[in-house]
Image (spheres, grey):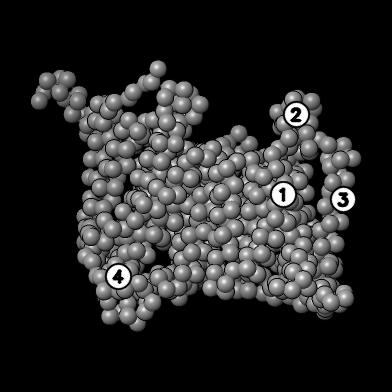
């Protein structure tokens, strides 16, 4: 294998990893505060996609549709919190998990009924499809945009979490919910905030995801939620830093397996990355990066 | 100090009573089915009985251990595919599955041998997976079962030489009748009730209620969880085998989220801690699915035209789950089992020395 090819694949993995990291962050955000592995998270990506389709067939331009799509995902995320998870505050881990499973089915089937069970496509701006030449390497514009946008969003998020009052309250709630409440953090508002941020991240990730595949089906949310889930487990359940690391690890793992495995084994890449998940859960249920425990 | 638990006579008597009550009720219901002479009804009830057996299998693990499992459909798949391979006539296998290992190419087993083979295979797979899974903390195991579901789906979708991948498998001989499905469910319910009342079952329930306290009393957490896991996988695979021999043709999409969701819905709505609840939940969801299947395709009532409503069935079931979780978190029946009051009448009669 030539050096060029390796570099090319690394670029590929970086772009993919930044998208996974972004999406995983949204899933980890809710998990860290509420302890909920939100199955319905993938449906937020679907909502973004269909909102964009709905607007774009009516002649609205891509950037505007994307922004409204992100807003739609955020609103839906907050709505699921208020209707499905808020009434179950005292319920068990299993009950909330089932609830999110049900929410995911509800959103999928609402889309089937309100729009269509058949796939829909949108026209991605031609600029995103182009390829930039950088010395001996070819880089897709979409990959660059994905990487830059994800990085920017993550930096903004870190700034928010580190500097703002709400961000600090959110981190406190993630570290220890009970103690955070004792010092005056309002539980319901913080949980709602975590869903809003989760929705925003899913929306932004969703725009990039849809731009990648160019179309949408009612059940398209499965792949993003699955990838985020794997990334979150690899990175350590519930730590935000871990989710980002996990996203990149997963992308590098996928790309490496894709390059190294013989072609008959490639369809099993998903299964193999899940084997990694099981192994990690077996060795240490907290994942690779442990939650910092302060003495 | 290690606390040993033997068989409790009272629990055993309760289990037998619940089993008899449930069996009689099921037999009565199934007895009336052929009277209608409706083929579709017969098929629906047969499928209901088999799916019930699988939901009861799921209950055996989830209800007693309190650990969520999203992965039981994997054992269902093992049972169904193995049975298909063992029962499809060799001449069809030559065409449909030409690259099957020669060992399986020529075999064609009868119905009962197939179910036993499937159950064994389910058990073996469950032991292998369970050895890793049961060591995890409860919630981590729940998440790992989710990975199991996706892994198994990806395996059957891509292992074309054995499963034909997305094209699906066909020509499984129809070996299951209403009667044999009824017998299967009655046996499965008996096993599940017996397990629930057994010392191992009790230890598993103790570990569900308080893992730490259970361990302190000498319960080997991993051992009891493994026991529940393997037993439920064996029943699940046997159920999958019967299912394959009723639906006759199926593909990987039957072993993924849709069916996981359906069966979990039955269990949650009916009551996770109860065998009767599992059957009742299955009955309820089956009835709802049948009722809403017609409007789903669109229909006309008088002058009102109802448009096609794709996905209506699942929407209704999902709303039902939400309602159950919020209003009645332990399901319709909670941990209660069906017991005909006849037993109590008998006791009062005895007390009064009338018989």
What residue is pinned by disc 1? A243
> In this orientation, which residue lies closer to the viewer: B204 or A108?
B204
Q: Secondary structure at mark 1?
A: helix
Chain hosting mark 3: A
Q: Secondary structure at mark 4?
A: helix
Residue B112 image position (x, y, % from top left): 22, 59
Mark 1 surroundings: few (<14), some (14-19) or many (≥20) residues within 10 A: many
* Tag nearer the camera, 2 or 4: 4
Mark earlier in primary sequence (2, 3): 3
Using the numbered discs, state the Cα–Cα distance from disc 1 to disc 4 in whole angstroms. Answer: 46 Å
Image vertical order of residue A4 relative to residue B140, above or below: below
Residue lying farthest to the left in this orientation: B355
Q: Secondary structure at mark 2?
A: loop
Q: Which mark is residue B103?
A: 4
What residue is pinned by disc 3? A156
Residue B152 image position (x, y, % from top left): 48, 60
Mark 2 surroundings: few (<14), some (14-19) or many (≥20) residues within 10 A: few
Left or right: residue A213 versus residue A268 is right
Using the numbered discs, state the Cα–Cα distance from disc 2 to disc 4 in whole angstroms. Answer: 59 Å
- Asked if marks 1 and 4 fall on the same chain, the answer is no
What residue is pinned by disc 2? A294
Q: Quadrant of the C terminus of chain B?
A: top left
Residue under the image location 76 percent in, 46 percent down: A241
């Amino acid at each position: 294998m030539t050096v060029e090819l390796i570099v090319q694949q690394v670029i590929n993995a970086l772009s993919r990893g930044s998208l996974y990291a972004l999406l995983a962050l949204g899933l980890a955000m809710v998990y860290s505060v509420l302890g909920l592995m939100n199955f319905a998270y993938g449906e937020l990506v679907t909502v973004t996609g269909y909102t964009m389709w709905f607007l774009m067939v009516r002649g609205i331009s891509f950037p505007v549709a994307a922004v409204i799509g992100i807003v739609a995902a955020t609103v839906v995320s907050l709505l699921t919190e208020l209707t499905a998870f808020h009434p179950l505050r005292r319920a068990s881990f299993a009950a909330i998990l089932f609830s999110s499973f049900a929410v995911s089915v509800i959103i999928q089937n609402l889309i089937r009924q309100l729009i269509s069970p058949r796939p829909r496509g949108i026209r991605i701006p031609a600029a995103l499809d182009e390829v930039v030449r950088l010395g001996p390497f070819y880089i897709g514009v979409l990959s660059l945009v994905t990487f830059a946008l994800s990085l920017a969003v993550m930096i903004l998020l870190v700034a928010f979490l580190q500097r703002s009052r709400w961000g600090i309250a959110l981190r406190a709630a993630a570290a220890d919910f009970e103690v955070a409440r004792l010092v005056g953090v309002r539980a319901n508002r913080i949980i709602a905030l975590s869903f809003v941020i989760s929705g925003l991240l899913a929306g932004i990730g969703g725009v990039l995801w849809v731009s990648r595949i160019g179309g949408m089906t009612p059940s398209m949310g499965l792949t993003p939620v699955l990838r985020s889930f794997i990334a979150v487990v690899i990175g350590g359940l519930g730590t935000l830093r871990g989710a980002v690391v996990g996203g990149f690890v997963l992308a590098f793992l996928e790309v490496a397996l894709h390059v190294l495995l013989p072609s008959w084994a490639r369809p099993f890449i998903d299964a193999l990355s899940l084997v990694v998940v099981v192994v990690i859960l077996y060795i240490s249920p907290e994942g690779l990066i442990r939650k910092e425990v302060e003495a | 100090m290690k606390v040993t638990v033997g068989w409790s006579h009272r629990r055993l008597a309760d289990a037998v009573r619940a089993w008899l009550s449930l069996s009689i009720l099921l037999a009565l219901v199934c007895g009336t089915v052929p009277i209608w002479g409706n083929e579709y009804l017969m098929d629906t009830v047969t499928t209901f009985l088999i799916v019930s057996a699988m939901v009861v299998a799921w209950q055996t693990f989830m209800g007693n251990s309190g650990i969520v499992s999203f992965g039981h459909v994997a054992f269902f798949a093992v049972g169904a595919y193995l049975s298909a391979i063992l029962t499809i006539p060799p001449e069809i296998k030559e065409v449909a599955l030409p690259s099957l290992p020669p060992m399986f190419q020529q075999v064609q087993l009868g119905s009962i041998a197939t179910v036993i083979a499937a159950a064994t295979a389910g058990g073996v797979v469950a032991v292998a997976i369970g050895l890793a899974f049961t060591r995890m903390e409860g919630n981590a195991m729940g998440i790992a079962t989710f990975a199991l579901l996706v892994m198994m789906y990806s395996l059957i979708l891509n292992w074309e030489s054995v499963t034909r991948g997305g094209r699906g498998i066909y020509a499984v001989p129809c070996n299951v009748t209403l009667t044999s499905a009824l017998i299967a469910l009655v046996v499965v319910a008996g096993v599940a009730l017996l397990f629930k009342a057994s010392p191992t079952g009790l230890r598993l329930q103790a570990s569900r209620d308080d893992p730490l306290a259970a361990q302190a009393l000498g319960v080997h957490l991993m051992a009891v969880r493994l026991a529940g896991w393997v037993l439920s996988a064996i029943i699940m695979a046997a159920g999958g085998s019967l299912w394959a021999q009723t639906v006759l043709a199926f593909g990987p999409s039957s072993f993924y989220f849709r069916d996981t969701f359906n069966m979990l819905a039955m269990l949650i709505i009916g009551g996770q801690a109860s065998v009767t609840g599992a059957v009742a939940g299955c009955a309820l969801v089956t009835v709802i699915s049948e009722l809403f299947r017609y409007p789903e395709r669109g229909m006309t009532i008088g002058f009102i035209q109802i448009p096609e409503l794709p996905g209506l069935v699942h929407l209704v079931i999902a709303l039902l789950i939400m309602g159950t979780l919020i209003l009645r978190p332990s399901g319709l029946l909670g941990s209660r089992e069906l017991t005909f009051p006849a037993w109590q009448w008998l006791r009062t009669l005895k007390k009064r020395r009338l018989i």
